[in-house]
Image (cartoon, coloured by chain):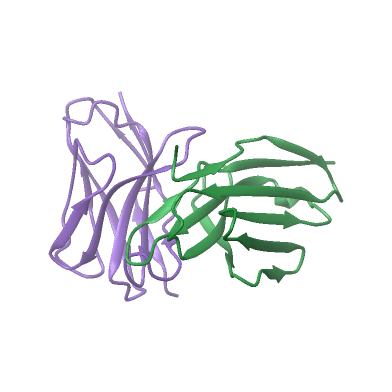
Chain colours: A green, B purple
Amino acid sequence: RKEVEQDPGPFNVPEGATVAFNCTYSNSASQSFFWYRQDCRKEPKLLMSVYSSGNEDGRFTAQLNRASQYISLLIRDSKLSDSATYLCVVINYGQNFVFGPGTRLSVLP
Amino acid sequence: DGGITQSPKYLFRKEGQNVTLSCEQNLNHDAMYWYRQDPGQGLRLIYYSQIVNDFQKGDIAEGYSVSREKKESFPLTVTSAQKNPTAFYLCASSPGTGVGEQYFGPGTRLTVT
């Protein structure tokens, strides 16, 4: 089993829709979690950190479920500009960042 | 402005030639990383460095070499031993290994023919 797994998609949704992605991780000792966004042929950029209590940034909400070992990203009121690949990242303290393979989102007009 | 720079953006080489990709950061980060990304694939770790003059192999180090003589710089050499070098190469840094967020440079797209 891979350490970090994501549904590769693509998720094709209309503008204004709500879409959610999950990411599962296998190491129960994982301590830090992030969502990154990567546009086509560009570098990944940090979208948001994921805290135990969950966090929200505008239309984006991230949640952590330690018991089931997954993190989620919810995007409300999708915009065309949200089209990208979303990467989840897991860190075990003092060790390296482990990237999931990414979930591709296409928001359609 | 603080950040990570990579050069060049596009690089073309003939098979059998070594090529060095540049990565510089002015974020005062201790840890630096090199990743490879193939079309439609995730990031794979090539090498990482936690401190000057020290570096460790990642998951796919064969055919690559690195150096870390300065905190700011972490160049990657793609050697002729790398069987399939055409890829998108990303350099990143973080305050420490597995600490804080990782920041990426714009990447170098290497094509070997």
Instruction: Give above or below for B18 relative to B90.
Output: above
Instruction: Give above or below for B68 relative to B2.
Output: above
Instruction: Give above or below for A95 relative to A56.
Output: above
Q: Which of A79 and A57 is in front in this view?
A: A57
Q: Residue at 73% across / 51% down in the picture?
A: A81
Quadrant of the image occupied by residue B31: bottom left
Percent x, y for residue A88? 54, 52
Percent x, y for residue B92? 37, 58
Q: Which of B32 and A100 is in front in this view?
A: A100
Viewed as shown, does residue A35 lie left or right of B5? right
Quadrant of the image occupied by residue A71: bottom right
Quadrant of the image occupied by residue A72: bottom right
Q: Residue at 73% across / 56% down in the picture?
A: A74
The C terminus of chain B: image quadrant: top left
Viewed as shown, does residue B81 lie left or right of A94? left
Percent x, y for residue A50? 59, 66
